[in-house]
Amino acid sequence: MDVIFEKSRPGRKGWSLPKCDVPAGPVGERIPEKFLRPAPPNLPCLGELDVVRHFTELSGRNFGVDSTFYPLGSCTMKYNPKVNEVAASLPSFAELHPYQPDSSAQGMLQLLYELERFLAEIAGLHSVSLQPAAGAHGELTSLMVIKAYHDDQGRRPTKILIPDSAHGTNPASSVICGYETVQLKSDSDGGVDLRHLEKLLSDDVAALMITNPNTLGLFDRNIKQITDRVHEAGGLVYLDGANMNAILGIVRPGDFGVDVMHYNPHKTFSTPHGGGGPGAGPIAVCERLASFLPVPVVEKEGNKYRLNWDRPKAIGKVRCFWGNIGVLIRAYTYILMQGPDGLRRVSENAILNANYLLYRLKDVYEIPYGHRCMHEFVISASPQKKTGARALDIAKRLLDFGFHPPTVYFPLIVPEALMIEPTETESKQTLDAFADALRAIAEEIDEDPRNVLDAPRSQCVRRLDEVRAARQLDLRWMSYPIHTAT
Ligand SMILES: *Cc1c(COP(=O)(O)O)cnc(C)c1O
């Protein structure tokens, strides 16, 4: 397939307009010199049909959950019900301007207010801010809230404890917020090592950032003891809520001692995501942190809704306008559609699907932690590595079987990790087909790993040098001649 610049023909265009009936003149007479480009932009010249065919063909080359099973661990690539799209594209939502006065945006404010209440209830916490733009941004915002709280108490603790199984955004957010991160070891069951926690706790600990269930897909049985000990030492407990898909309606983070958490609505509440966006990262906090939430917050007085900007202890503004509204509308629609019982069934089925897959794979791949899991699990290709194929090779070979690969080499504490999250939206037939593929690949490796090392062969590209691709962008069209429509 050609890149779009190779399809370009000088002078071809996708528009035709009637002859202009206002006097034309050199553009330089109308636009000040300093705003003019020195040369025309390097745009391809194509007809409308060329453009439609080009992008339709490209879209078919993409892996998406609408076309393929997408068991990307930690990312919760569940199906996005199309009713969410209908709601998000309603003209009265989509055409709203963020600077409209509150009185003319009552419907949207009501939606945001109710979504805040839903998220507070699911979390078992007091208040919510919908503003952060992604999970990682929710982490940073929460850490700023934690800092503001300690400041307000006249304390300046400097450390954040983070388990060694955590997502990389946890230490990154802490460092950006000016904290020192301290790594907390996992025990042989994959949970927090309580003795190590005890050793690290001091009045210099601002918070523990914990993911529960963690990235191994395990719910930490000691969670209450852990959060109690952190509180006794004067610290707060932050929950990375990326794994909420496992516990909706089953257990509330606020009940196991969490003070502040983020949601990834694009994961848990089904907005399509990937390739870097879009997402949102609402945070929920306990009552003693509520006054530090960023402005504005949505409030209800009588039956009127308004944005409150007047909050003296707030950490300030973290996102332009009101947040990533499109994602929030989808989350609201999804939560209403499921209702409380439906949300619980989401988690129960996510857990059932993951355990079924784990059961179908456990005699072929190594299971580093536990033989039961929550909504996802981690297998290790260490045995396969001895025969000559690594987790990366297995991931690439899965593409030839028509599946998006799972997450690989994460969490870092499992060598040759393949992290599998089927989600609740997949049928038994799909799970079986995926398990059969992984079993067939293991067999190939045992017999002759060459097929696997050579994969993928069914795709338009083979193995890409990912590091080089990121560091040396080869935008081939840069060197193509400029065609100007004259
Ligand atoms: C996805 C994820 C994050 C980051 O969330 P984004 O919305 O991608 O910024 C943090 N922690 C865990 C465990 C995750 O899976």
Image (cartoon, rainbow, N blue to C red):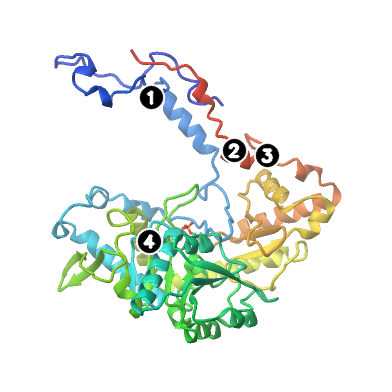
- Residue 285 at x, y = what percent? 37, 74
Q: Relative to residue 139, is residue 332 drawn left or right?
A: left
Label whose residue precedes the other's in the sequence (4 or 2): 4
> Is label 4 or label 2 in front?
2
Residue 455 has which mark?
Answer: none
Residue 131 seen in the current view: yes
Label whose residue precedes the other's in the sequence (3 or 4): 4
Q: Which residue is mark 3?
A: 463
- Give the crowd class for mark 1: few <14, some 14-19, many >=20 residues within 10 Å: few
- Compared with 272, 140 (above or below) is below
Q: Which residue is mark 4?
A: 331
Q: Amino acid at mark 1?
A: Glu
Label whose residue precedes the other's in the sequence (2 or 3): 3
Q: CA distance from mark 4 to mark 1?
A: 35 Å
Which image quadrant is residue 255 in? bottom left
- Give the crowd class for mark 3: few <14, some 14-19, many >=20 residues within 10 Å: few
Q: Which residue is mark 2?
A: 469
Secondary element at tag 4: helix
Q: Amino acid at mark 4?
A: Ala
Q: Relative to residue 22, is residue 467 drawn left or right?
A: right
Label whose residue precedes the other's in the sequence (3 or 1): 1
- Give the crowd class for mark 4: few <14, some 14-19, many >=20 residues within 10 Å: many
Which image quadrant is residue 413 in? bottom right
Label whose residue precedes the other's in the sequence (2 or 1): 1
Q: CA distance from mark 4 to mark 2?
A: 34 Å
